[in-house]
Image: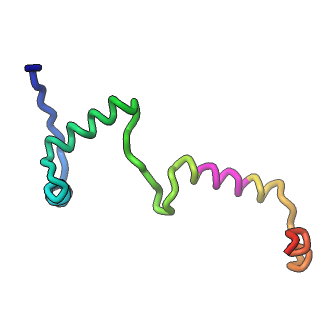
Amino acid sequence: MKSQETIQIRVDAKTKAAARKTLNNLGLDMSSAVKLFLHNVINTQSIPLNLKTANGFTLSQEQTMIKETEDAKRTGKKYDDLEKLFSDLDI
């Protein structure tokens, strides 16, 4: 059998209890869940989480949208007349 190492982490009691409850509902203990996470880190060579901003996008998606919006504000066409805007949009 391979030798085992110990990992210690600090987390607040509320987070630990909520995570333990969720994991128990999934049939996992905390140790097994951490092992699964670490194996996924190895297999994907990344942090295997789908992190999203408060707006529901990945950080990369949100940064792209912000850049596109800033570019459009700087270089885009401006309208003083709503009818002209709709005309250009073919609506």
Q: Quadrant of residue 25?
A: bottom left
Residue at coordinates 85% horizontally, 69% vertically from top-left?
89
Q: Work out whether 30 lies above or below 8.
A: below
Query: What is the tally of numbered marks visible in this picture?
Result: 0
List the single residue furthest toward the front.
27
Give the magenta-colored segment's residue range: 63-70
Does the magenta run of residues contain 39?
Answer: no
Q: In the rendering, at what x and y percent does residue 87 appear? A: 91, 74
Q: Work out whether 44 lies above or below 24.
A: above
Q: Quadrant of the N terminus?
A: top left
Q: Of residues 54 and 24, which is closer to you in this image?
A: 24
Q: In the rendering, at what x and y percent does residue 74 appear? A: 79, 55
Residue at coordinates 35% horizontally, 30% vertically from top-left?
43
Q: Is residue 65 left or right of residue 15?
A: right
Residue at coordinates 46% horizontally, 62% vertically from top-left?
54
Colour scheme in the image?
rainbow
Q: Quadrant of residue 52?
A: bottom left
